[in-house]
């Protein structure tokens, strides 16, 4: 639970920072409306990330709509994305339970045989067109709509791509002068388990159909427009390519390496290309004249000399402030700092510790005395009725114990037991040392931090006397009491054994009764005075035993809290380190070290301004013991609140990503005696990291590629030092087009590499899948909706 809480906090902080709030940063806007059409179940994971990326980067992304074409199923499924009102479903023939040999062929035939699917498609496109019109105020122009179709090459539903595309154009064309259509075909090259052969065959079947759709002489005519009365109206296309551009994006890059993030980079690519082609550019844009994107130029650049339609791909990388990692590092370091201060506490002498816990010898003796009835009550024992009236002559040769028995039998013992021993025991019953300590310690922890459970755990430990343990000191005192009790008991026994005649009390000649009375007074004051002293010692020992038990309980509670704190500290540390480990070498460099210094500095500044104990006041952490008693989550929630409300809003966290990265790179230089990293060297590393990270996401046989055209675009503040540096790198020797998408931001920079000019047969995926495709076809698989004879031959 604590990990999910901390990760949620980190995500919230990152989202706030990446949304560029409260920093004066600006986001881009798109010029024309945009519609994303996701085709098939297998592309479901792309919906959320693509739309989320648009919302992060586009100021007017609130009007972006999406359609998800899914197969009909028994359950009433909702759109995969939570934006149900903006992600509408389009139901197509179901694929579950179909014969795998003919599923693409069968659903294609069913679609054309049952008009209900086509009617549903018409309704969905008309609804989405009306919804887009509701957001018209968000866009600069309503002349054009950008339609982006995203599908997985091995999803059977892409067999409907011509029908979906042409119907979308026909319906949207009634509201817009032009519908610019791009296709993003996603290729998953990770092993498909037991389905890898079939999956490759279906993927290749789609690519063969795609080549047909992109041929210059492609034509299509079908009654796709359906009215509410069921009348069908033909829609015609061609001869011409069906799509403006087709992007092939794989989870394996040009170097043959599988991406750690799988398809996640491709989702970013889709939103960034959509922005690149549809961005509002004002005349005051600082990037004007610095190689902005031109769609016609790119299409011309990737066109080969043969006139065949070529395909494009892209790569994406980014360098951002590692906001999630920063948030987690700060959370850990704040907790570490608070725990360290609680461990250290203030120095306490043994005498001060005993006084705080009311364990000093004077207090213990006083508490024991308070348990006993007044000692003067012993004099009242002289009024006890004696058994008979023995003369002094009868008593004088007896021991004191024998004389007492002759005089009172067990009466004296019973009286002392009932009026002294029982009373003190009853008074001891309600004594609960933990009750008095808790109120004392809670107040101390909140207000002055005079003592914490870390210190109490140490003070109450069962260790040797040199450790400063009050428990050890108490046990030593109890040992002394036991010795004193033993000595007192021996004295009492010796006193009882003494002869009456030898006792120093006043004898009155000729007045025997007066002499006996004087002896009785002496007996009670001396013998029972000794018993009273013994009772006081025994009562003090009982008090100490209660306190000993209380200290053991207090130790157990404090040790439990210490262990919880240690577990929390380790959990926060592990979460932070794990998050840092998922960043690149340059981006994740020295995060823990740098933010330890920054966090300590911010906390020190707050303590100087607001007081040394500010973080333990009720406005901040308050009583940590009480929080721990509620559970770890209560501590984390309070800690997160402090970080969000105070620390992360401090000035050191508002640096630009370049400055933050430079300071972080050099934080350990003084300690390790390393050469300080210069700004130029840092920029070189960043540039190299962005370039290596944005290798295009498709695997090609480069030696067969007819014409390779590349364009590279930076997204960021074109006036920043780093992007000024990037513009000059290879300025005289570069063979690619370099451009900027200016965004007034401080949080990072992104790079999008576009590459085109290759054909399908240049794909390693195509060559590997060809043998599977041919084998499955020979074994009776019908992998196309149309007659394969109408499709281009495999190359």
Image (cartoon, helix red, strand yellow):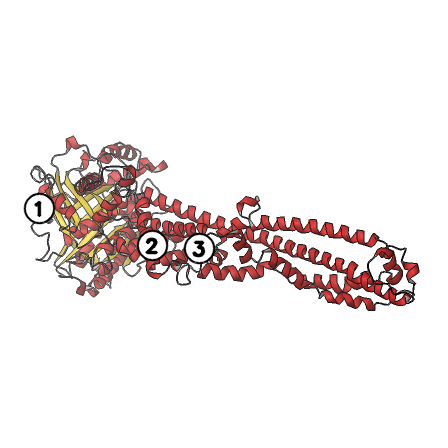
In front: label 1 or label 2 = 2
Disc 2 residue crowd, few under 14, some 14–19, many 20+, Cα 10 Å: some
| Of 112 and 348, the residue lying toward us | 348
Give residue 487's mark.
none
| Of 334 and 695, the residue lying toward us | 334
Report the residue at 24% width, 46% height from top. Answer: 663
When asked about the image quadrant of residue 550, the answer is: bottom right
* Residue 48: % across, % down: 29, 53
Proximity of marks 3 and 1: CB atoms separated by less than 8 Å: no
Q: From mark 3 to mark 1, how far is it between C-alphas?
A: 56 Å
Residue that badge 3 annotates:
633
In front: label 3 or label 1 = 3
* Residue 614: % across, % down: 38, 60
Residue 71 in the figure: left or right of residue 363? left
Q: Which residue lies furthest to the top in this view?
A: 703
Residue that badge 2 annotates:
604
Disc 3 residue crowd, few under 14, some 14–19, many 20+, Cα 10 Å: some
Report the residue at 74% width, 61% height from top. Answer: 421
Residue 343 in the figure: left or right of residue 592? right
Q: From mark 2 to mark 3, how far is it between C-alphas?
A: 26 Å
Q: From mark 1 to mark 2, how far is it between C-alphas?
A: 57 Å
Q: Please say whether residue 81 is visible from this viewpoint.
A: no
| Of 65 and 728, the residue lying toward us | 728
The tag earlier along the polypeptide, 2 or 3, is 2
Give residue 297's mark.
1
């Amino acid at each position: 639970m604590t990990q999910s809480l901390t990760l949620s906090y980190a995500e919230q902080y990152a989202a706030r920072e990446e949304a560029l709030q409260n920093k004066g940063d600006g986001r881009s806007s798109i010029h024309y409306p945009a519609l994303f059409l996701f085709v098939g179940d297998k592309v479901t994971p792309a919906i959320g990330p693509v739309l989320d990326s648009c919302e992060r980067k586009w100021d007017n992304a609130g009007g972006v709509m999406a359609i998800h074409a899914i197969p009909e199923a028994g359950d009433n499924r909702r759109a995969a994305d939570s934006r149900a009102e903006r992600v509408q479903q389009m139901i197509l023939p179901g694929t579950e339970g179909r014969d795998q040999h003919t599923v693409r062929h069968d659903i294609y035939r069913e679609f054309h045989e049952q008009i209900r699917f086509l009617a549903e498609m018409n309704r969905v496109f008309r609804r989405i067109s009306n919804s887009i019109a509701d957001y018209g105020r968000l866009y600069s122009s309503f002349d054009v709509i950008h339609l982006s179709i995203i599908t997985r090459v091995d999803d059977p539903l892409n067999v409907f791509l011509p029908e979906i595309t042409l119907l979308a154009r026909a319906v949207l064309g009634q509201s817009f002068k032009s519908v610019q259509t791009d296709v993003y075909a996603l290729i998953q090259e990770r092993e498909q388990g037991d389905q890898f052969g079939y999956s490759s065959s279906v993927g290749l079947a789609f690519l063969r159909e795609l080549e047909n759709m992109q041929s210059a002489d492609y034509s299509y005519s079908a009654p796709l427009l359906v009215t509410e009365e069921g009348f069908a109206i033909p829609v015609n296309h061609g001869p011409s390519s069906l799509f403006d551009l087709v992007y092939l994006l794989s989870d394996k890059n040009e170097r043959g390496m599988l991406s750690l993030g799988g398809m996640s980079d491709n989702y970013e690519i889709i939103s960034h290309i959509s922005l690149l082609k549809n961005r509002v550019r004002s005349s005051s844009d600082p990037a004007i004249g610095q190689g902005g994107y031109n769609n016609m130029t790119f299409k011309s650049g990737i066109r080969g000399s043969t006139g065949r339609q070529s395909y494009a791909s892209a790569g994406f990388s980014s360098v951002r402030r590692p906001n999630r990692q920063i948030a987690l590092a700060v959370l850990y370091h704040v907790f570490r700092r608070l725990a360290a201060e609680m461990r250290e506490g203030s120095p306490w002498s043994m005498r001060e510790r005993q006084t705080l816990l009311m364990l000093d010898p004077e207090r213990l003796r006083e508490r024991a005395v308070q348990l006993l009835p007044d000692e003067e009550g012993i004099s009242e024992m002289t009024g006890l009725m004696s058994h008979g009236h023995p003369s002094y002559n009868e008593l004088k040769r007896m021991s004191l114990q024998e004389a007492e028995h002759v005089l009172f039998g067990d009466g004296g013992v019973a009286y002392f037991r009932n009026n002294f021993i029982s009373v003190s025991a009853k008074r001891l019953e309600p004594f609960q040392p933990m009750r008095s300590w808790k109120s004392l310690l809670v107040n101390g922890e909140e207000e002055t931090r005079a003592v914490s459970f870390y210190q109490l755990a140490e003070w109450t430990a069962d260790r040797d006397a040199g450790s400063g343990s009050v428990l050890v000191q108490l046990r030593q005192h109890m040992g002394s009491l036991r010795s004193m009790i033993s000595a007192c008991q021996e004295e009492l026994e010796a006193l009882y054994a003494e002869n009456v005649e030898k006792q120093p009390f006043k004898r009155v000649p000729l007045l025997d009764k007066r002499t006996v009375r004087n002896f009785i007074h002496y007996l009670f004051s001396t013998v029972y005075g000794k018993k009273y002293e013994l009772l006081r010692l025994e009562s003090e020992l009982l008090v100490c035993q209660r306190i000993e038990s209380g200290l053991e309980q207090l130790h157990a509670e404090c040790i439990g809290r210490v262990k919880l704190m240690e577990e929390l500290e380790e959990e926060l540390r592990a979460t932070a380190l794990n998050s840092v480990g998922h960043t690149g070498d340059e981006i994740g460099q020295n995060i823990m070290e740098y933010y330890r210094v920054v966090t300590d500095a911010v906390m020190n500044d707050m303590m100087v301004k607001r007081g040394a104990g500010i973080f333990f006041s009720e406005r901040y952490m308050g009583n940590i013991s009480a929080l721990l008693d509620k559970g770890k989550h209560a501590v984390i929630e309070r800690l997160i609140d402090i970080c969000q409300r105070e620390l992360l809003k401090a000035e050191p966290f508002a640096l630009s990503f370049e400055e933050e990265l430079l300071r972080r790179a050099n934080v350990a230089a003084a300690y390790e005696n390393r050469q300080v990293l210069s700004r130029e060297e840092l920029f070189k590393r960043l540039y190299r990291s962005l370039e290596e990270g944005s290798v295009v996401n498709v695997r090609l046989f480069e030696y067969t590629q007819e014409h390779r055209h590349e364009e590279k675009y930076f997204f960021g503040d074109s006036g920043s030092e780093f992007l000024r540096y990037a513009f000059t790198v290879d300025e005289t020797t570069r063979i690619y087009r370099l451009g900027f998408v200016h965004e007034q931001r401080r949080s990072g920079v992104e790079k999008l590499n576009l590459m085109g000019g290759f054909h399908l047969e240049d794909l390693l995926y195509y060559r590997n899948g060809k043998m599977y495709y041919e084998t499955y076809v020979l074994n009776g698989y019908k992998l196309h909706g149309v007659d394969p004879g109408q499709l281009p031959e495999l190359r």
